[in-house]
């Protein structure tokens, strides 16, 4: 009797799990499939390509390569090396700044109660405000400063916007470090800055790494501001993807390939974060 | 030079000064990158400026509250808002319920739990724009949804042009959001549920409660505060939806039928180059959001943890 | 007819045998105490009775029904956890009513029962307060009330008083005894505090390493411990345990403890039948030793006072007889350094076989 019940539960559970997996991986599988299909199969329902090719990927880097034997008019879409590098530069630098400045601020708020309620308020605020509301003034602002379509503009912007996350996360970690340890060092006459670098930072290395990776992902995948600020010079990967989708119409193969290339680093980083921070990683303390 | 440095070092040794020094970079960045543009936004909203009219923006004619009045009466603005609210009100509860469902599926131990968990959490890590791209590709006329799924469900050659019908297009955008963020809800609900002390569950068992009753009367009530925060955070994020709308329906298509509020403002600023009006609309939105959050925070702040 | 029958229970956690072979019966209105140090398997046994752990082998019968495969929900058992585990998000009323609500008891019947139980436990005043702000003794009563309101066939208590500060413990001990008497359900409780066991239990089962060493009434366990472990565990301060050898000298039989010897010729025959060898351990409780300044008893031994622990109405004297430390409980006007004469009450002497650790006298 109980056996029957257990059997049914067992089967039901795994059946549902498979369903969930299919739903979850469905889009990915289709993307992979498309990215390996020749143009003749782009509109067919088969998941496994009959004639798998790598041309889709190659064409992203060298835009004049034929795909599956057909030449495409890819003059509007550009190779992705430039956007990839752009994304890399912008995301990395913004992350470094955000973590740096965020750490200083988090430390100030945690240990010195500096910034007061405003900092907390600001932290909540920047998460709430839709980016679109800043589009108009930002356009005007950067145009006036002649910073449109520059690295600086995006780096500054990304830093400012992700500061809230780095402060939130790092503050959590700093709070965990017993203040007594720092006070002991201070009492021995060490300069506060030394205390920070010698005592605190080594202890929260994990937190710094986690916030850096998390912010990097945010910066890498950011779309709206990149779309607005960049014109030709600093087109980032997400913008490139959208340009590709609209410009080249139904070139599903390369589009899918591009999408996958953009995703893989993020997924890897995502798993790295997962492994290192299982507890409490719901964007700070959700309490 | 070194005396200057030493003076700074000495000055920063005092706690209050050091604290101020720490906050300095933050303040600089905030002011230059966010505060000034905010000021510009306020200024612009009171002017009537067109970039193509030949004048610099700071010389633009002051137009008082013209733009605001126009915005409040703007049907397109209203619809964009309504649409966005419908989006949030639909998507967030579904994500929560599905997340809860998946949590129930994952309770207890079973073979391969770790792998299944990794797979289920995967969508959160896909860049938003790629999610949009994925779903865009899937719902194409000759895409798998039409060719595989519908064929399996309804047989025959059903071909739905998803992006040409307003409701259907909206549906696809919602599906994309649900696909990406349900795992987050799952993560939050699951961690919450698991953190309920086993003792309480054992006590309930001995008192005769079935698993369903335990879930309903013990576990869910205990994680209610957590869930509420999660719903609010997800709701705020969902409100900003843009990336998927842009790439899947060209920022609002067909026509303006899937135009969310972010898409509308974007178009105003970039496509129509109507910066003043965009600024006015943005300001109204911000004020509204601030008020609503204020109202929502009050009862939450009073609620004892 | 016993309410609870436990037979040959065994529980393995991986390779660790937490419970080796436990059997006992508990009748209606009786309170059995499972007493033992941590890790002896008492809590595991309790959890198996409740249904929260499945026995590796053995049987559990409640009212003559085999319940091994019955879920904890359906066993009709009340369980009070060590940390009480009352539901923090509910009021006292809802906590008490939980089991009834789960059974869909009609509202007015529910209210009547809750009021009754609250009155019995003195909780009527806090009935509608949240469970979060309650004091420890109130929490305990809610935990108990929550269980007994369902008229369980058996009540199980896991270390009911270990969370409690020493001073309050006495009062709560008294309360528990009163409640026990009033309710009269078959009860099994688990504790490591032998005083608690002695006061609250109708019978005590002393456990060690997954086995019951002795199961008897408190007086019996106190006066006639079956094994060395039981002898040592029960009684505060602990029984004096001294190694000795059974020696025959001339016509007399002695227990030779090197620093002193005791003549046991009268019952030597009985002892000799049960021992496996001459090596024994003798035990005598501090309260069964008698001290005097002058030598009254010819068989008395000489000891020196090392230090004295004053307990108020009596004191514990740490003596040294030769090399051996001996504790005596009593009252005598002496100081550290003084010499006293110690007499053994032979009727209260215990002897244990050194190898088997079983009592031979």
Image (cartoon, coloured by chain):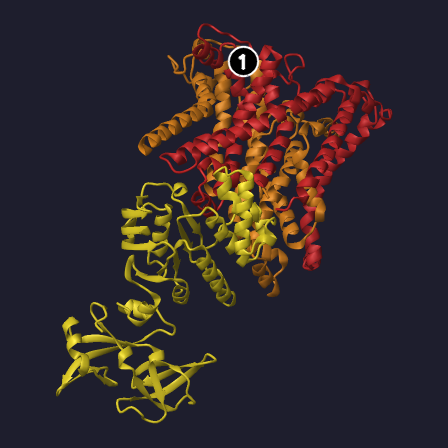
Chain colours: A orange, B red, C yellow
Q: Is residue A76 visible?
A: no
The residue singled out by tag 1 in the image is: A74
Quarter of the rendering containing residue A178: bottom right
Reply above or below: B48 against C288: above
At x 76%, y 25%, the residue is B281
Q: Is residue B169 visible?
A: yes
Q: Is residue C126 left or right of residue C9?
A: right
Label 1: which secondary element: loop
Q: Is residue B62 left or right of residue B86?
A: right
Q: Nearer the viewer, residue A114 or C358?
A: C358
Task: Name the residue at the top extreme.
Answer: B157
Reply above or below: C353 against C184: below
Q: Position of residue C51 (x, y in %)?
A: 36, 45
At x 59%, y 10%, the residue is B164
In the rendered image, which quarter contains the N terminus of chain B?
bottom right
**Label 1 neighbourhood size at 10 Å, few (<14), some (14-19), many (20+)?**
some
Q: Position of residue C55 (x, y in %)?
A: 30, 47
Task: Name the residue at the left extreme.
Answer: C250
Q: Nearer the viewer, residue C317 or C289?
A: C289
Q: Is residue B146 left or right of residue B239?
A: left
Quarter of the rendering containing residue B6: bottom right
Q: Position of residue B144 (x, y in %)?
A: 47, 14
At x 35%, y 46%, the residue is C53
Q: Position of residue B24 (x, y in %)?
A: 70, 47
Reply above or below: A242 against A172: above
Q: Nearer the viewer, residue C174 or A238?
A: C174
At x 57%, y 33%, the residue is A218
Quarter of the rendering containing residue C291: bottom left
Count of marks overlaid on the render: 1
């Amino acid at each position: 009797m109980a056996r029957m019940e257990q059997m049914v539960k067992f089967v039901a559970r795994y059946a549902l799990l498979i369903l969930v997996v299919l739903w979850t991986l469905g889009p990915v599988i289709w993307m992979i499939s498309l990215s390996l299909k020749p143009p003749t199969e782009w509109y067919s329902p088969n998941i496994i390509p009959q004639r798998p090719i790598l041309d889709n990927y190659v064409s992203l880097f060298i835009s004049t390569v034929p795909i599956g034997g057909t030449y495409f008019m890819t003059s509007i879409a550009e190779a992705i090396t430039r956007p990839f590098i752009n994304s890399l530069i912008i995301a990395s630098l913004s992350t470094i700044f955000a973590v740096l400045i965020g750490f200083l601020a988090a430390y100030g708020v945690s240990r010195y109660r500096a910034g007061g309620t405003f900092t907390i308020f600001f932290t909540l605020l920047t998460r709430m405000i839709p980016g679109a509301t800043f589009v108009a003034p930002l356009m005007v602002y950067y145009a006036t400063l002649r910073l449109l379509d520059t690295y600086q503009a995006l780096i500054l912007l990304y830093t400012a916007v992700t500061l809230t996350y780095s402060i939130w996360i790092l503050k959590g970690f700093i709070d965990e470090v017993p203040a007594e340890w720092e006070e002991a060092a201070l009492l021995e006459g060490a300069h506060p800055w030394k205390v920070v670098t010698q005592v605190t930072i080594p202890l929260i290395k994990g937190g710094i790494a986690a916030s850096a990776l998390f912010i990097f992902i945010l910066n890498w995948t950011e779309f709206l501001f990149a779309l607005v600020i960049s014109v030709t010079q600093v087109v980032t990967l997400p913008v490139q993807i959208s340009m590709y989708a609209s410009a080249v119409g139904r070139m599903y193969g390369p589009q899918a390939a591009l999408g996958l290339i953009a995703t893989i680093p993020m997924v890897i980083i995502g798993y790295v974060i997962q492994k290192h921070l299982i507890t409490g990683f719901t964007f700070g303390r959700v309490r | 030079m070194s005396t200057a440095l030493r003076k700074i070092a000495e000055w920063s040794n005092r706690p209050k000064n050091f604290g101020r020094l720490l906050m300095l970079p933050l303040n600089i960045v905030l002011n230059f990158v966010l505060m000034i543009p905010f000021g510009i936004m306020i200024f612009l909203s009171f002017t009537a400026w067109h970039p193509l009219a030949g004048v610099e923006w700071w010389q633009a004619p002051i137009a008082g509250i013209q733009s605001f009045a126009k915005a409040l009466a703007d049907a397109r603005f209203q619809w964009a808002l309504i649409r966005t609210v419908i989006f949030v009100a639909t998507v967030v509860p579904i994500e929560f319920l599905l997340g809860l469902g998946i949590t129930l599926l994952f309770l207890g131990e079973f073979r391969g739990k770790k792998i299944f968990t990794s797979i289920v959490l995967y969508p959160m890590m896909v860049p938003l724009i790629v999610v949009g791209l994925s779903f865009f590709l899937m719902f194409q006329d000759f895409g798998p949804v039409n060719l595989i799924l519908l064929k399996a469900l309804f047989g025959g050659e059903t071909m739905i042009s998803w992006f040409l019908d307003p409701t259907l297009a909206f549906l696809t955008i919602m599906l994309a959001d649900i696909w990406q963020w349900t795992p987050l809800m799952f993560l939050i609900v699951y961690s919450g549920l698991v953190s309920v002390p086993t003792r309480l569950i054992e006590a309930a068992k001995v008192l005769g409660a079935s698993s369903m009753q335990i879930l309903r009367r013990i576990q869910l009530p205990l994680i209610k505060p957590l869930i509420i925060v999660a719903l609010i955070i997800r709701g705020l994020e969902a409100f900003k939806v843009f990336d998927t709308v842009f790439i899947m329906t060209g920022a609002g298509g067909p026509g303006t039928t899937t135009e969310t509020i972010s898409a509308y403002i974007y178009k105003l600023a970039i496509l129509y180059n109507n910066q003043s009006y965009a600024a006015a609309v943005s300001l109204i939105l911000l004020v509204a959001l601030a008020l609503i959050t204020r109202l929502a925070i009050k009862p939450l702040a009073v609620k004892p943890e | 007819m016993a309410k609870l029958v436990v037979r040959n229970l065994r529980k393995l956690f991986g390779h660790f045998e937490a419970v080796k072979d436990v059997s006992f019966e508990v009748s209606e209105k009786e309170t059995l105490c499972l007493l033992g140090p941590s890790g002896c398997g008492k809590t595991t046994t309790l959890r198996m009775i409740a249904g929260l752990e499945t026995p590796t082998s053995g049987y559990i019968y409640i009212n003559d029904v085999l319940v091994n495969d019955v879920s904890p929900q359906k066993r009709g058992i009340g369980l009070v956890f060590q940390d009480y585990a009352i539901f923090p998000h509910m009021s006292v009323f809802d906590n008490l009513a939980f089991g009834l609500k789960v059974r869909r008891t009609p509202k007015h019947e529910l209210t009547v029962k809750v009021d009754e139980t609250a009155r019995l436990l003195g909780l009527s005043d806090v009935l509608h307060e949240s469970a979060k702000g309650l004091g420890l003794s109130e929490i305990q009563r809610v935990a108990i009330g929550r269980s007994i309101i369902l008229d369980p066939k058996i009540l199980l208590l896991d270390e009911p008083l270990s969370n409690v500060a020493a001073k309050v413990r006495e009062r709560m001990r008294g309360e528990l005894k009163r409640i026990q008497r009033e309710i009269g359900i078959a009860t099994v409780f688990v504790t490591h505090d032998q005083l608690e066991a002695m006061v609250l239990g109708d019978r005590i089962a002393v456990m060690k390493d997954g086995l019951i060493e002795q199961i008897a009434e408190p007086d019996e366990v106190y006066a006639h411990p079956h094994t060395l472990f039981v002898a040592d565990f029960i009684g505060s301060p602990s029984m004096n345990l001294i190694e000795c050898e059974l020696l025959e000298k001339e016509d007399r039989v002695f227990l030779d403890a090197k620093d002193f010897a005791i003549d046991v010729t009268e019952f030597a025959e009985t002892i000799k039948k049960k021992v496996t060898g001459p090596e024994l351990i003798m035990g005598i409780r501090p309260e069964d030793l008698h001290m005097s300044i002058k030598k009254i008893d010819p068989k008395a031994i000489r000891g020196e006072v090392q230090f004295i622990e004053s307990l108020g109405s009596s004191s514990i004297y740490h003596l040294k007889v030769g090399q051996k430390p001996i504790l005596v409980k009593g009252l005598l006007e002496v100081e550290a350094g003084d010499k006293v004469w110690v007499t053994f009450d032979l009727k209260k002497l215990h002897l244990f076989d050194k190898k088997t650790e079983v009592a031979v006298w």
